[in-house]
Image (tube, rainbow, N blue to C red):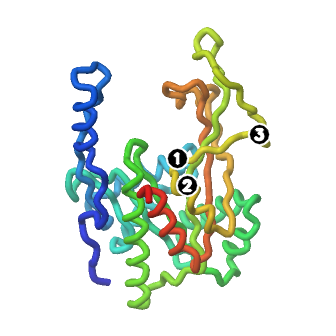
C-alpha cells in the first residue's frame, strides 16, 4: 500500500501565538499573564525505527494500572507492523517521540497473537454493561472488530484529534481498495474516563470542599479524558465504563488531585460502533472539537 499521508495537518489548528498576543494586549504588564507557546504539530505514519518507546509510554498511559497485564512491547510492535495505517503526532520532527497516536487493529486477523488474546479476553470480561460485545469477540464469531487505540499527553489540544480520525478513514478505504483485511463490521474504541471522589487526606491537609459528591456507584458522575468520547456515544451500539483489575494504593486518587478539591479515580471506557455509522461518528467528532 503506497504512502499517501501528508506529514502536515490538513486542518489548521488555532494559532497559540495569536491568543498570547491578545492576552498581552488586554493585560499588559500583569503578573497574571501566561506565556503562550506557538507549537507546530505534525502528523506522521508510525515509524518502526523511532516510535517503539514512545508508543509504549502512551499505551501504558491508556491502559493505566492494568497496563502490567499485557505485553506492551508486543502490542507496540503490532501497531508498528502496519505503518501506513494510523497516525502519530509530533512537534519536533519525525525522529522524535510521539505526543499522541491513533491506530486500529483487526482483532480477528491478529487473534493468534498472545497480546490480542489477552486484550480480547480482558475487554470481553469488562463488557457486562455492553451485552453486544462478548458475542462479537467470541472465537466463533464472524464479526470483524477493529480495536481503535488512541492516547495523547494530557496537555495536548484536542484539535489534533479530528485529523487523525479523518486520515484513518481514508487509509482504511485505500487499504480496502488493495484487498487488505480492514473490512470491519464494528469498531471498538478503548479509552479512559474518571470519577471524582472525596479526598482521603486529613481534613486539615485537604482543601475545603465547596460541594459534596455522592460516591455511590449509582450517583457517580463520569468525566472523560477524551472529550470526543461523548460524541462517539451518540453513534454507538453502546458504551460502558469499567473498574481496573490491578489494586492501587490508598490515597492514589489524591495523588491525581492536582489543584482541585476532589480526588480523581480513573476507569477504563469502551465505545462500540457499527462500521456503517463510523463515518458519521467521525464527522460529529470533527464538528464538535472544531467548535463548528
- Contact between labelled residues 3 and 2, with CB atoms less than 8 Å apart: no
- Measure how far apart labels 2 and 3 are at the Cα level: 22 Å
Residue 124 is situated, as x and y percent measured from the top left of the image, at: 69, 63
- Measure how far apart labels 2 and 1 are at the Cα level: 8 Å
Residue underneath mark 2: 191
Q: Tell me if residue 96 can be seen.
A: yes
The image shows residue 159, relative to residue 140, as above or below, that is above
Q: Nearer the viewer, residue 141 or 292?
A: 292
- Measure how far apart labels 1 and 3 are at the Cα level: 19 Å
Q: Tell me if residue 48 can be seen.
A: no
Name the N-terminal-most of marks 1 and 3.
3
Are there few (<14), some (14-19), or many (20+) residues within 10 Å of tag 2?
A: many
Residue underneath mark 1: 225
- Contact between labelled residues 1 and 2, with CB atoms less than 8 Å apart: yes
Residue underneath mark 3: 219
| Rendered residue at 41%/63% (across/down) | 162
Amino acid at each position: 500500500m503506497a504512502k499517501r499521508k501528508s506529514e502536515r495537518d490538513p486542518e489548521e489548528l488555532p494559532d497559540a501565538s495569536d491568543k498570547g498576543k491578545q492576552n498581552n494586549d488586554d493585560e499588559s504588564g500583569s503578573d497574571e499573564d501566561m506565556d503562550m507557546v506557538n507549537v507546530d504539530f505534525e502528523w506522521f505514519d508510525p515509524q518502526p525505527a523511532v516510535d517503539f518507546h514512545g508508543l509504549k509510554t502512551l499505551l501504558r498511559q491508556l491502559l493505566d494500572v492494568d497496563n502490567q497485564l499485557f505485553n506492551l512491547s508486543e502490542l507496540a510492535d503490532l501497531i508498528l507492523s502496519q505503518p501506513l495505517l494510523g497516525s502519530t503526532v509530533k512537534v519536533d520532527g519525525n525522529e522524535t517521540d510521539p505526543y499522541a497516536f491513533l491506530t486500529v487493529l483487526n482483532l480477528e486477523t491478529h487473534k493468534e497473537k498472545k497480546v490480542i488474546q489477552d486484550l480480547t479476553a480482558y475487554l470481553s470480561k469488562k463488557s457486562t454493561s455492553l451485552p453486544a460485545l462478548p458475542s462479537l469477540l467470541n472465537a466463533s464469531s464472524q464479526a470483524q472488530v477493529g480495536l481503535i487505540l488512541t492516547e495523547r499527553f494530557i496537555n495536548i489540544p484536542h484539535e489534533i484529534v479530528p485529523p487523525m480520525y479523518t486520515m484513518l478513514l481514508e487509509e482504511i478505504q485505500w487499504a480496502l481498495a488493495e484487498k487488505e483485511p480492514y473490512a470491519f463490521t464494528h469498531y471498538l474504541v478503548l479509552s479512559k474516563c474518571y470519577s471524582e471522589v472525596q479526598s482521603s487526606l486529613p481534613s486539615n491537609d485537604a482543601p475545603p470542599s465547596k460541594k459534596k459528591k455522592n460516591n455511590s456507584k449509582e450517583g457517580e458522575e463520569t468525566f472523560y479524558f477524551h472529550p470526543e468520547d461523548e460524541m462517539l456515544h451518540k453513534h454507538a451500539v453502546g458504551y460502558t465504563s469499567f473498574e481496573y483489575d490491578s489494586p492501587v494504593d490508598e490515597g492514589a486518587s489524591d495523588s491525581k488531585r492536582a489543584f482541585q478539591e476532589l480526588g480523581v479515580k480513573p476507569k477504563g471506557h469502551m465505545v462500540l460502533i457499527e462500521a456503517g455509522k463510523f463515518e458519521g461518528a467521525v464527522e460529529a467528532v470533527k464538528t464538535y472539537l472544531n467548535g463548528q
